[in-house]
Each structure stands twice: as C-alpha cells, then as structure tokens.
Amino acid sequence: MENFEFSNPVKILFGKGQIANLKNEIPDESRILLIYGGGSIKANGVYDQVKEALAGLFVIDFSGIEPNPHYETCLQAVNIIHSQNINFILAVGGGSVIDATKFISAAACYKGADSWDILEKHTSIAEAVPFGTVLTLPATGSEMNSGAVITRASDKNKLAFASEKVYPKFSILDPSVTFSLPAKQIGNGVVDTFVHVVEQYVTYPANALIQDYFAESVLKTLLLEGPKALQAPHDYDVRANLMWASTWALNGWIGIGVPNDWATHGIGHELTAFYGLDHGQTLAIVLPGVLRVLKEQKAEKIIRLGEQVFGIYNNLSHDERIEYTIQAIESFFEEMGVKTHLSDYGLGADAVEAIYERLKSRGWKLGEKRNITADLAKEILLTRL
Ligand code: NZQ
Ligand code: ZN
C-alpha cells in the first residue's frame, strides 16, 4: 500500500425523513442561497420538503443549473451571492447541482481576476462559502467529496477542480427522493458508480486489501441492486443500497493508498463537452475500450475483478478470463439500459478525430501509468465505434 494522508469531514444524514432535520445543520443567522436544477425537485415534492424545513430562515432561490453545469450559469449565482450578502448555500439535486455549488462557493470568494483559472490552472482556493447538500440522484459521490466538474459552454470545455475547501458541511441522503428518477438516470447513476470503483481498483496490484475488498463490495451491490431498481423503482431498500454505494464509490476511501486511473473519465468528459452525451453514457462507451487496450497492464486486477465480482473462474485461459470479464461489464451496462458504443449515439470516426485533436492540444497523459496519450485514447475510441 502507498503512503497516504486522508480526512473526509462531510457529515451524512441518511434515511427517510432526514430533510426535516435540515435546520439543525444551518446556522440561524444564515442568508441562504438555495440552488437547484431544472425543476425535478418541484415535481417530486423535495422542494416543498426543503422549504418547510427552512421555514423562518432567509432564503433566495437560484434555479436552472443544467446537467453538466455551465460556468456561465454559475457566474450568475456568484453575482447574487455578492449582491445579497449570502453566507450559506444549500444545493438540492444531483451531481450537477452539487458541482455547480462547489464552484460557486469557491468563485464567490476568489480574489483572482478570472475564476475560470480555478478550473484551467487549478489556482489554489483560500476560502469558500459554506454549503450543504440534499442529494436527489445517486451517481457522482459529489455529496461526500471535494471535486467538481464544470463546463464552459462557449468553447465546450469541461474541466474539473478539487479543493478541501469545497467539501460539503453536510449531505442529506434520503433514498425515497430517488423514486422519481427516470430509468435513464438510474442506469447512468449505476454505470457512473461502477466506473468510479473500476478507475480506483482495476489498475495494478498495490497489496491494499481493505481498498480491494471495499471496492468489490460496492461493485457487487451494484450488480445485485441496479437491475432491481429498474424493475421495482419504489423499493426503498434497493434505493438505499444504491445511494450508499454511489457515495462510497467516490468519497475518497477506496482510492487512497492505491494507484488511480481516471482515463475513462478524462476521455468521457470530452465526449460530453463535444456531443452532449450524459456522463454515464460516455463512461459506458469508453471503459471497455480502456480495459481491452490496456489489458496486459491491468491483467491481474481485471482477472481479480472477474473472479471476485462476476464469478469468472478457472478452466479458462488468461486471455479468456480477461475478455469474459470485459464482456460481463458491457452486458451489465446494457442491462442497465446504457448503450456501450459510439454508433449507438450516432457518433463515428469523425467524433474520434475531434476528441483526439482536443486531447492532443491538452497534452495530458492519463491512466495509472500516465501512458494514455491522445494517440492511445484514439486507439481506445476506435475500438468503440
Ligand atoms: O435538473 P433537474 O430538474 O433536477 O433534473 C435532473 C437532471 O435532468 C434529474 N434528476 C435529478 N434528481 C432527480 C432527477 N429527476 C427526477 N427525480 C430525481 N430525484 O436528473 C438529470 C441529471 O442530473 P445530474 O445532476 O446532471 O446527474 P448526475 O448526478 O449524474 O451528475 C452529472 C454531473 O456530475 C459530474 C459529471 O461530469 C456531470 O457533470 N461528475 C461529478 C463528479 C464529482 N463531483 O465527484 C464525479 C463524476 O465522475 C462526474 O464527473
Ligand atoms: Zn463519474
């Protein structure tokens, strides 16, 4: 195991009815900006629950955060924070609303000339407006981590930043608010969670057994519960297991002390930025390609994944075990309703070329061995036509 330092300060309030406890977590004198998305919280009753829980406090609404949140929209919220002397933010929504809130909270306190530098140059963040979250879509883990991904719509740039200043103060996870998710978002969330685990687990062995067994437990939970959520959308226990799985997949714990990959996410973000695919869809396309093209580098962990999670055992050659494991992952994504090829989304070789050019201009070297250049990314995508 590699050395690490780690702390995760996010308080979790998990379970039915926890939104009612919101007020206990927010200082009385707060001037609150309530940030949400396109209106799902109004349709499913979450908005009313939140407003009731905040009764008597000063609250201004800011709605309209897009999926894959826009930098341009975030700047409008920053202006409101300044003009209304906001000193606490409440994010109510999925990863996009929470990520937007992280950026808004940092940008509102940013002293530099251009807050885009937080994303492009990773300038350090000295201060951020404190915020809490009410999660409505289990997928990103943003509710219990310090990262965010923001898109500048004007030039199709989707970039990430992380800072310990943007951990939520608390996150409320009530699985029953996820009953209203459309099937597409259930699938996306399960795929995203699955890929978060794989990016921290299917690298090369680091003899980190705690992390490996935890990673496998999250994956097994997804395999068991994901399809059930599609078949029985109002099963509370299924939703609870999926919600806690997605938080665990990216709250830091399984990724410490081990190599991390993140190439699938790096390539996937470009697909979203250029073609508007959902985050989960991009990952379902890219991951099988990364695993096939890097199968020797990742062989030991792919075989371990096959054995521990999918029950792919002996009497098979080394190559068969790897290939059957990758096929099992593809089948699972398809079972969750998330298509796994570029052509399923109307994309072809032109798209591969565009992503290649973008990655070449970025000059990134991705993957746990930093060997995934633009050329290798192109090779990966060409296996996914
Ligand atoms: O906008 P509203 O009306 O709320 O509708 C949303 C949105 O249309 C809807 N939705 C959310 N909860 C719902 C619901 N509909 C019905 N019932 C509910 N309970 O679902 C749609 C998608 O929401 P979004 O927040 O965009 O999805 P997700 O949580 O998958 O977030 C995706 C964003 O997170 C980033 C992605 O890149 C993408 O921008 N990520 C953030 C990460 C992080 N901070 O650690 C890591 C991830 O890898 C990811 O990159
Ligand atoms: Zn993700």
Image (spheres, grey):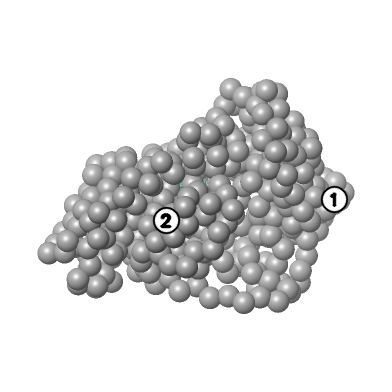
Query: How far apart, in angstroms, are the residues tagged by discs 1 and 2?
Result: 43 Å
Mark closest to the chain's N terminus, 1 or 2: 2
Tell me: 195 left or right of 142. right
Instruction: Say which of 40 and 326 sits in front.
Output: 40
Which residue occupies 53% across, 52% down?
117
Judged by depth in the image, the label closer to the viewer, 1 or 2, is 2
The reply to whether residue 239 is visible in this rendering is no
Q: How many marks?
A: 2
Quarter of the image where the N terminus is located: bottom right
For label 1, the crowd category at 10 Å Cα-Cα, with few meaning under 14, some 14 to 19 and many 20 or more, is some
Q: Position of residue 330 (x, y in %)?
A: 65, 40
- Three-letter amino acid code at disc 1? Glu
For label 2, the crowd category at 10 Å Cα-Cα, with few meaning under 14, some 14 to 19 and many 20 or more, is many
Q: Which residue is mark 2?
A: 107
Q: Position of residue 154 (x, y in %)?
A: 48, 33
Which residue occupies 23% across, 44% down?
42
Q: Which residue is mark 1?
A: 296
Label ID, residue 70:
none
Tell me: 117 left or right of 384. left
Q: Position of residue 172 (x, y in %)?
A: 34, 63
Q: Is mark 1 within 8 Å of ligand 2?
A: no
Q: Quadrant of residue 254?
A: bottom right
Q: Quadrant of residue 382?
A: top right
- Three-letter amino acid code at disc 2? Ala
Instruction: Say which of 30 and 377 sits in front.
Output: 30
What is the secondary structure assignment of the residue under circle 2?
helix
- As drawn, the residue found furthest toward the left would be 56
Instruction: Say which of 196 and 354 sits in front.
Output: 354
The reply to whether residue 266 is visible in this rendering is yes
Q: Position of residue 286 (x, y in %)?
A: 66, 40
**Dot 1 and dot 2 residues touching (CB under 8 Å):** no
Tell me: 46 left or right of 215. left
